[in-house]
Amino acid sequence: MAVRIAIVGAGSGYMPGVIRGLLHRSADLAGSELVCHDTNAEHLELMARLARGMFAARGADFTVRTETTLKAALDGADFVFTTFRPGGLPGRHLDESIPLRHGVVGQETAGPGGFLMACRSVPVLLEIARVLEEVAPDAWIVNYTNPTNIVTDAVSRHTGARIIGLCDQNIGDTEMWAELLGLPADGLEIDWIGLNHATWAERVRLRGDDISAEVAARLATLGPPDAAATPHRDPIRMAEVGRALGVLVNSYSKYYFFHDDVVAELRAKGTTRAQDIMAMLSGYYAGIAEQAALPDPDPSGERGGGEHGEFAVDTICAIAGDEGRRMIVNTRNRGAIADLPDDAIVEVPAVVGRGGPTPLVMGGLPGPVRGLTQAVHAYERLAADAAVTGDERVALRALMAHPFVRSKRVAEAILAEGLAAHRADLPQFRGTPAAAEGVPRP
Amino acid sequence: MAVRIAIVGAGSGYMPGVIRGLLHRSADLAGSELVCHDTNAEHLELMARLARGMFAARGADFTVRTETTLKAALDGADFVFTTFRPGGLPGRHLDESIPLRHGVVGQETAGPGGFLMACRSVPVLLEIARVLEEVAPDAWIVNYTNPTNIVTDAVSRHTGARIIGLCDQNIGDTEMWAELLGLPADGLEIDWIGLNHATWAERVRLRGDDISAEVAARLATLGPPDAAATPHRDPIRMAEVGRALGVLVNSYSKYYFFHDDVVAELRAKGTTRAQDIMAMLSGYYAGIAEQAALPDPDPSGERGGGEHGEFAVDTICAIAGDEGRRMIVNTRNRGAIADLPDDAIVEVPAVVGRGGPTPLVMGGLPGPVRGLTQAVHAYERLAADAAVTGDERVALRALMAHPFVRSKRVAEAILAEGLAAHRADLPQFRGTPAAAEGVPRP
Amino acid sequence: MAVRIAIVGAGSGYMPGVIRGLLHRSADLAGSELVCHDTNAEHLELMARLARGMFAARGADFTVRTETTLKAALDGADFVFTTFRPGGLPGRHLDESIPLRHGVVGQETAGPGGFLMACRSVPVLLEIARVLEEVAPDAWIVNYTNPTNIVTDAVSRHTGARIIGLCDQNIGDTEMWAELLGLPADGLEIDWIGLNHATWAERVRLRGDDISAEVAARLATLGPPDAAATPHRDPIRMAEVGRALGVLVNSYSKYYFFHDDVVAELRAKGTTRAQDIMAMLSGYYAGIAEQAALPDPDPSGERGGGEHGEFAVDTICAIAGDEGRRMIVNTRNRGAIADLPDDAIVEVPAVVGRGGPTPLVMGGLPGPVRGLTQAVHAYERLAADAAVTGDERVALRALMAHPFVRSKRVAEAILAEGLAAHRADLPQFRGTPAAAEGVPRP
Amino acid sequence: MAVRIAIVGAGSGYMPGVIRGLLHRSADLAGSELVCHDTNAEHLELMARLARGMFAARGADFTVRTETTLKAALDGADFVFTTFRPGGLPGRHLDESIPLRHGVVGQETAGPGGFLMACRSVPVLLEIARVLEEVAPDAWIVNYTNPTNIVTDAVSRHTGARIIGLCDQNIGDTEMWAELLGLPADGLEIDWIGLNHATWAERVRLRGDDISAEVAARLATLGPPDAAATPHRDPIRMAEVGRALGVLVNSYSKYYFFHDDVVAELRAKGTTRAQDIMAMLSGYYAGIAEQAALPDPDPSGERGGGEHGEFAVDTICAIAGDEGRRMIVNTRNRGAIADLPDDAIVEVPAVVGRGGPTPLVMGGLPGPVRGLTQAVHAYERLAADAAVTGDERVALRALMAHPFVRSKRVAEAILAEGLAAHRADLPQFRGTPAAAEGVPRP
């Protein structure tokens, strides 16, 4: 099936992963065209060169085109794959460091950091949706731009565009639980339900057999994982939270149930993740350029693992090929998860085919995390509203509703700093006479 | 995947279709064992002989065993396939003729005829579920016994057995609509939703593409089908009702929207469908016996087409092989169809794997048939309650709730006649001192 | 509390009942102004004269004004009370006789007769709502125009007007059940729930005490009422249906459960109710004129009992005086009745105060009438849509959805005759090229 | 209406307020009997003497009896009024101080302090319900024992007793908002909805008129209250949170949105509220004894204001007299608040009559507090389950679900200390081999 895939943000460091994802399904997508777009022309051309080189070396039947205007890039697209980051890594650094100064986890997608990211991402996605309406009204936006569910919520409530929100966290978390529970990763299928980065599971299958009872038994007596074998803390905390709650938890659960410890660790670490990546990236594009010049390029330095690319390309194939494939994606709830509103964007197992994702009926959330998930959803709805309207009162309500924050003082301080620091990327927030509304500005 | 399939009612005329269904998936089910049971020992042995002959002739790796007690037949089963008809064809004749005498459509599954059938079927299925609890608690009942959704409702509310209700009507109706709308049957997929024999659709896909708008447009201007090409009236009426309602309707919709015409036709016809089949069946078992004696038996006289067998065996394979196959089945709603209760047994697209069916989220029923479907569901719940408890007051309420009947006088008359005529097969109804409760008895 | 009450249709025979209702609360409403409007100027002046005479004779502090334009009549109104009948009694005669010709109950509010009435009433109410927006945006429409719930649904979904739908059937039905069950009418309170003219009850209180169990016991053994003491059949059938269903039923339940008998009786009777009233009315206005000329007028010939007037005026007082009075009214469901949509107009106990009615939480409908009520609601929604849009396809779907009809042939025939007969009063239906849509026209 | 009211905990300092409440409705309750019970015989007799003296002095027709066994006290009761505190003020001191040591607000009803209180209260209430089943199955428990909604949830899910949960916070909060918004307290009615101590409002009426829009406008520009006129911080914070969220908030909202400030203040204060009361109480009973000896006793030192007594007695009168009075009470939701489960115990406006409370339909929670309220509800359900079963794993999940806590470490520490400190009052928690389950014990 030959399709046209527009990649917005094609100059980013995620691009090699996308190229690999495409190679992994090159037979299915033979004859397809990639239309690459980025605001950084140099990186755009570099990545296009890399893609052409890798496709040629592996005999993949893809053509690659670059476009510098969004309209030209999206024209006639079947799929729009978004990987850009408005504000770049410096913006991410702000998202990670501002909350931390006020005792709150600073994180790319969760909490106030994710909120600020949403405020930068949403306007760009709304613009993409607006252009699509004109030049490719039937295109599917395959969204990886964070925070994926808030972005998906804003786009699907405020535009006519078709959008599916992706995140491959469920793949990694399933692997981690396989290891923690002593189960084979191959054939293990977990019904993760909830919200992106706030998913939970009680139902587990191994090669089709329901092993939920066995998993619950193992979970109840789960000891801490071998510290030697687990160099970082995530699995230890997942195991601990999971055992306490009697529920399989996602890897971001540490932010909710070990919030202050994580804050202390992040502070002790001294640099943000964004800073670490920027340091690593100093020679990154030079390395890519070297590879792109080789007959068989092999960019081993790409970020984000290969999974995000494979997951996105699998989604494109599931839709284009009407595969009816069962995948965990972010889409409108419509009754699939009983404890969340019908119009919530949820992360849920769905059958993905030509018409996009159709969620499977999943019942209720596990009791020990029901309220938390509902609270996160209420925040997300407010966050999407704030990101669309630029209303600072709604922004403050969003932060006051987030389980990380709640404190009015802290919410105000983070909001004031964040809006000031990102002002260039937040056109929608410039109109409100915030001072008059009682929200102090820096 | 080698499984043990118990067939209850294996002496029935549906058996050749089941055998063909098994042959159609013989590679997938290689090594499986059929355990056949019937109350008619002669027919049981005959059909077992036929099965062995057909399997041998086509090289299918199945073993066939007969058992005369239910317990021995169900012992260790992975699947229980039910095709029996309590009361036999004479019972069906009563179901079809009693309502007709009172001006109501007499039908095997819909209306008061179906109600009487439910009252005979439910106790037998409850007994099967009770025995399974003892000898094969993990077995799946693959239920074809009519009326399949009332039976499935009774079993799943009153026992711990796992049950999936099947009906292949959606296959035939999809084919019929393909012809009416001038669409290719191959690759046409219709999301039938509602209740068994009361399903409706607004969403249609052709080889994955959503063609719902095109279908709606064709439907709006649909003329009557070519009478010469459509020897019987069903497609004509489906077309007419579908166009009027703006909805794809199932073939039983004629009973609701042309009720009195159908009554007149059935009366004019003079014999019931049961009588017609009994007439055809006179030489049926002799023919089967002849075939069973041949080296390569080919029973062409089997009833019910081949589809019911294939559909059932496909369901068994979907579960045993964890295929995650999308099928339209009868199962617990749980939010899949917004206008019916969560605990209703609905007919709905579901993903079928090792854990059974998981419904897909389908949204609301089409407005023009929403109320009718809800009314039929309310009847079905009362009917299941009556069939389980044998409470005549509830039985009367069930008939008064059915859209065919509603009239108290007619409901009373049909109920009195029906209970009297079927008394031998209705042990649960013997206890109620009906007269004292105000329900007249014959 | 002095309010301004506009009465639209003030020349109708219901007016003396309204006057009596006002007298019954004259102390509470002292200083209020009645603004009377009717398209029949002669009847309008006559009734205004009668009202002035009756108020003067009984010392009620009301002023009475007549207006011939709707805008002048509604200007500054606090309440708008509607009692008009578009098409008059001749129109009602058509509503009652057309369905009957096709074997369907012809009735003022239920079934196809009510549908035709809705099609005439809705445009007038929409016009009133439109004028109110301009001249009295905060006014409450106290709607008695039939069918009250379809009218209320159309107005509240399509305009910004505030509307409460009234019907005093619950008062009469409560009295009738008191007699049937041998309970004192005084202090008997029944929680009628459902839809106007399709209400049901399982909960009964006597002077505050819950006597539901006692009522259920009496209902189960209820014999037919004394025929001598019950000159007409209604109570006999209510008793019979109630006993069979185990539910207190409203007096219109006979139309659903004795439909064909009622048709036979109506046909045997030979004249419609509208004809009977027209015959009675021949001297009616002359009698009113005589009374109006007396010093203490006493119009004993008014129609509709006194209850409708008292009920309407009590509602006005409950709102104006913020009484928080518990009344059974027609309003938006919002979760009060579990088995009907949140946005359905339901008949339900509500607390009525300055902000209008707030429904009380009532739980689910009784099982034996759940499906019927849902079916009637689905019809009503289609009927409101048809009455607003004048779309004949929707009109046909409404009739095909009604439990009285269902038959496509009958629905088509009644619709064609009805639209033709009432054409002058159905401006909204003139636009559709019905023939092209497949709906035959006469 | 003469009723028998059993008062469990009649020796407590709340008793004078109850007596005053009874005097306030002495005419309505003439002829009633108070049956007083307490485990402290001395205080019991003292309060009974006081009651007799106050009733005699004011001519109230009540008889007062004391009983030392629960069974004798409850025998034949119409109402059971509970005011006891298991563990007494020393227990409350622990509830307030243990969380504080771990950086969490220590509070009588909210957060971990309330959780420990629930664990002590629930078994006593279950015992009362058990005795009632035997000696007064129709009695209404009018519950003031904290935390009232968790207690009400446990009793109504696990016993057949009739219970209504009371709290007069809504009265005080309405008064406080009247002052903050510059509105007259008299005639101001606020529709508080949510959960006890977590209620919110968007709809406000003043003498019946909906002034919600005016209130929203005043709220948006609300400045801080005059510090001189508001000696303590509660109104200042209510105003601040209310303005930020655009919602009227209850006085406990400070614990959620100023959590850390409140912790700092409580720590700085040095004594718990329980200690303060114990200090005040040193001479309390001596003062009561003096008053009880006077001809016209006037106990001015009673705690809890007079409102709790009046509110409880008004509730008793509303039920006994079938008043249909609109009150804000804690009862089963059943759809009244759209964002909470049907079976949640909610605080909601209800009509209270002989059959108890029937909630009014209220729609959804305000967006900015929706998630928080859902999170508190999820905690409360887990808390009730833990308090009933004594399962320490569920107890840990409850604390981890509470918005004050969430941290696993903190939840574990508070739980371990709390269960150890209150061990004598927590019989239900003795059975679990907690160590084996992975929850450390002190």
Image (tube, coloured by chain):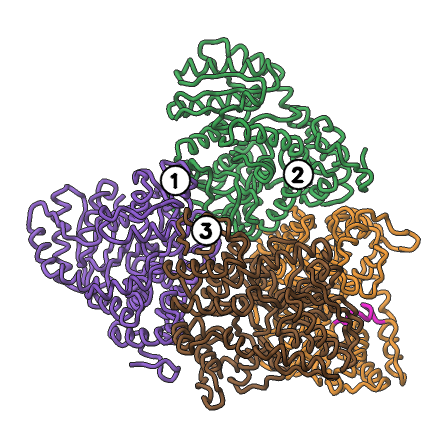
Chain colours: A purple, B green, C orange, D brown
The residue that label 1 is drawn on is A205
Q: Quadrant of residue B233?
A: top right
Q: Label 3 is found on which chain of the structure?
A: A
At label 1, the amino acid type is Arg
Q: Label 1 is found on which chain of the structure?
A: A
Q: Indicate which disc residue A336 carries.
A: 3
Range of magenta residues = C302-311
| Front tag of 2 and 1 | 1
Instruction: Evaluate whether residue C385 shows in this view.
Output: no
At label 2, the amino acid type is Gly
A257 is within the stretch colored magenta: no
Residue at the farthest bottom position: D228
How many tags in the picture? 3
Indicate left or right for C388 with C111 as reference.
left
- Residue C220 place in picture, x, y as percent: 79, 47
Instruction: Identify the element where label 2 is drawn.
Output: helix
- Residue A289 place in picture, x, y as percent: 8, 55
- Residue A190 place in picture, x, y as percent: 37, 44
The residue that label 2 is drawn on is B111
Q: Nearer the viewer, residue B284 or D235?
A: D235
Label 3, label 1: how far apart the Cα atoms are? 19 Å
Upstream in sequence: badge 3 or badge 1: 1
Indicate left or right for A107 with D257 as reference.
left
Q: Are marks 2 and 1 on the same chain?
A: no
Q: Label 2 is found on which chain of the structure?
A: B
